Image (spheres, rainbow, N blue to C red):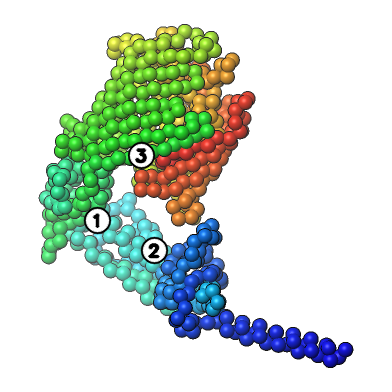
Amino acid sequence: MWRKDKRVLRAVCCLLIIWVWTSVLAFGLTLEELDPTHQWRVNKLVISGNHTFSSQELRATLLTKERPWYLPWQERPRFDPVTFSTDIERLQRFYEARGYYKRQVTYDLTADEQDALVTVQINIEENQPVTVAEVGIETSEYILDRDTPPFHEQLPIHSGDIFTEATYQAGEQVLRDFFLGRGHAHVETQRKAEVALAEDRVRVQYTVQPGPQAVFGSTRVEGTKDVDPQIVLHELTYQPGEKFSLQKITDSRQNILALELFRSVQIAPEQTDTKPPVVPMLIRVEEKPPRSVKLGLKYSTKDEFGAQIEWHHYNWLGGGRQLSALVELGSVTRTLDLTFMQPHFLSLQTRAILSLQQKQEDEETFLLNTTRLRPRLEHRFSPRLSGVLGYRLEWAKLNDIAPATVRALGRITRDGILSGPSLGLIWNTTEDPFSPQAGHVVSLFADQAGKLWGGDFNFYKLTAEAKKYQHLGWQTVLAGRLKIGLVDAFGSRANVPLFERFYAGGEKSVRGYGRRRLGPLSDSDDPLGGLSLIEGSVELRRPLWRQLGGAVFVDFGQVSLDPFDLPVDNLKFAAGVGFSYTTPIGPLRLDIGFPFDPPDGDQRWQVHFSIGQFF
């Protein structure tokens, strides 16, 4: 019995020795110990020991990648020792740039000789970061205005903060912008950081030489080929002789980019050996093709699929004139639109737009065919404030009006001419039109149509909307909106066209409810619309992974049959989640909404897919 136990014990010991020996061979390998005759591939990449920064952030800095778990059919990526060695240096530099000078980055490699696979284990010891001991600013004699806060309050780097290269460099740019914005066109800056690792402290010093105040001189344009340089000069917000201003340069660049004629625009003072008080300016542009074709798709549970194609010429007949044609096909809406835009009409800040449109809307309660001619003037009072003065001339015909709608609303004018002026004001402080991160937009619009203008309808309509975007940190944006609409007739309510009433629910309204399904319904369960509207949304947005973003939202709204009767005591709510994917033409957006109290028989959820943020 003892001999048998000894044989078993001997076998176990042999297996243990073999296991330990193979473990020693498998773990703790260095790059030099990998067999160079093998073409190694990455089996798995593991990062451990990191606490301040996520593994996702660290992996993004590496060129060595593992195969995504969701692509099991793909071949595993190659493992290149030279690239991986550089990756270790990248991680060290990543931590150093964020103040972790004492970080330790090591690695272990596990090699599977048979399958030529390498498992990579990266070990990180972050240790204590260095903090800012003090921030010093040296500048030649400069007297601050009474209302101008001290330099230190404007800097992104402060005593006691963890030292990062990003805020260190941004501090220098803030100082440059401070003086550039006050007419100093020849600002010179230097920065210095003294790191004391023994104390885990760093001392930061900025030196600024503002130079004399200056004024704008002449402006020269480089890079134009097919575009007349005068088009570029017309978009400048400054004139020769005006005080030099960084804000005017920024606004001018945005105006030039808005022409859609250039891939890139750079505006800067001309390089000179001296510091002249009259600063000549240079604009460098890179043209892009003047024509474009855009395709779009959208989907919602109620409206099903829709598609559109748009052709746009951004320099038609020269002079920056624009011509576009749009064709939109959907289960509800079908549109043919031709639009012409003349820039600098009557003044450099005004443009004229003429739109000719043929549209059909196949709603639940009616079929609308309209032919519209809409001329308007858009004037830019300032970089933030713009106004619209237009005129509406439309011929409209309603067919297939639901009998229950007629019973509920009374007499309905089925066809006629809508004629009258429109007026609007827009205040916009956002920077990104596709996905705002901060700022707000306030818009006010007023429409009036009447027999005074030769039309058959007689009413007025007021719409106000406010949108607010607030960056909360951690790449999260809080977005909110509130919309109020009022419409009323002069005389009989039949003077308000059925298609000019307010409707709520669906895409661009209260998600979770079907199109126009929020508000008064007829006895046959069809939307009636109303003369007063209130809508709003609160939404949290943040990136999830690469170009993929996510959102959670709550929408609310309601419609009243009576004018000047905002139904705040009868609001309906919906909540849901949204996903967006960033593309060069704007974010692709998918929203799934769940109504709190849907009409009887309606779905308990709605799906909306479109291009662009919801608001």
Disc 2: CA contacts within 10 A as few (<14), some (14-19) or many (>=20): some
Q: CA distance from mark 2 to mark 1?
A: 19 Å
Q: CA distance from mark 3 to mark 2?
A: 41 Å
Q: Quadrant of the C terminus?
A: top left
Does label 1 or label 3 sit earlier along the sequence? Answer: 1
| Residue indicated by mark 2 | 167
Does label 3 or label 2 sit earlier along the sequence? Answer: 2
Residue at 39% x, 22% y is 360
Q: Quadrant of residue 2?
A: bottom right
Residue 208 vs residue 559: left or right? Answer: left
**In the image, which disc is placed on residue 180?**
1
| Residue indicated by mark 3 | 295
**In the image, which disc is placed on residue 93?**
none
Disc 3: CA contacts within 10 A as few (<14), some (14-19) or many (>=20): few
Residue at 60% x, 31% y is 603
Residue 522 vs residue 157: left or right? Answer: right
Residue type at the position of mark 1: Leu
